[in-house]
Image (cartoon, helix red, strand yellow):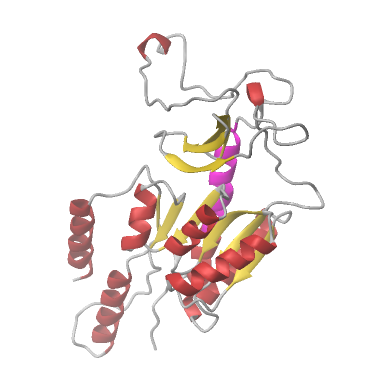
Amino acid sequence: MFEIGVKRTSVAAIGAIALAVVAHAQSAIDWSAAAGDLGATKYAPVDQITPANVTKLTQAWTYQPAGPSPIVISNIMYFVAAGTVVALNADSGTEAWTFKLSDATPGGVIRRGMTYWAGTAQHAPRVLVTISSGFFRGEEEREMGFRSAMRTDQPHRSLVEISEGGGLDAPMHELVLDALERDPGIIAVYSCGGGNVATVESFDELRRAYAVFIAHDLDEDNTRLLRDGRLSAVLHHDLNQDMRRACHIIMKAHGALPGAIQSVPSSIQVVTPYNMPSLGMRAAFGRRDATADA
């Protein structure tokens, strides 16, 4: 008797931890009102700029037309400029979306500043959980583990689940749009499977922003979304490596390979936009893993 130790529920627990860590890190540098906070203190609790390096700062990016009193939520900068609400990626200055306001008339829209509402005790922010299908056992176990971890670590947050999109963009787009239109409190996404491009496009279509987006598996779509800053992190494990180990265990059980049978948990990598491996490094990692399992 032998088994392959793959801890899927621990993967989902890592998802909950990553979600909480990223959310905490982002909230620590939010600029949620004009001049920073409701007291207009203009204070940000960051330590990257010091008296020793302030003279060495250089311009990172510019945007025209600029607007007064911007706010920053989860690394997205919002402001009103020339009658248009603008949302920019705070790191790069690239546009996330824009929205043209109606003409300012008595009793109409006032084109001045913005602020942020994060919900109340009765209407807490919610996390959208996407599953390709309830019949996909691996994704189901991720979702179960995620719910368990969230109940323990983030009990004040509610989960909104959608499934049966098959991980395909077209059905996932409709499912996510419907969920977002029904629930304005969704501010984060945990994706157990595919269709993440459609999920991002659904938020963009409704001019909605999310604070955190955690996905699984560093495939082509997720790699592109991660490089574009549309995903916060990807929980990745090498399925090819898992298959190699499974084959080696079977061969050892039948005496085709020497050595004792060992149950090894599947290794998990938390990949963010800041630690993404290059294509060459990913290929090298694959060769190294194959050598280690030989």
Please tell me in which quadrant of the rendered image residue 63 appears. top left
Residue positioned 54% across, 29% down in the render: 82
Q: Nearer the viewer, residue 92 or 182?
A: 182
Residue positioned 59% across, 24% down in the render: 45
Q: Is residue 147 visible?
A: no
Q: Position of residue 271 (x, y in %)?
A: 39, 52
Q: Position of residue 233 (x, y in %)?
A: 44, 52
Q: Position of residue 217 (x, y in %)?
A: 38, 64
Residue positioned 40% across, 37% down in the render: 94
Is the magenta region chiefly helix, strand or loop? helix
Say which quadrant the C terminus sits in. bottom left
Please tell me in which quadrant of the rendered image residue 244 appears. bottom left
Residue positioned 40% across, 25% down in the render: 62
Up the image or down, 4 lies above or below 106; here it is below
Check residue 108 for magenta coloring.
Answer: no
Say which quadrant the N terminus sits in. bottom left
Check residue 17 for magenta coloring.
Answer: yes
The residue most toward the right is: 122
Q: Is residue 205 visible?
A: yes
The total number of labels drawn is 0
Q: Nearer the viewer, residue 152 or 256?
A: 152
Looking at the rendering, the stretch of residues picked out in magenta corresponds to: 15-30
Up the image or down, 88 lies above or below 270; here it is above
Q: Position of residue 212 (x, y in %)?
A: 54, 50
Q: Nearer the viewer, residue 94 or 32?
A: 94
Please tell me in which quadrant of the rendered image residue 260 appears. bottom left
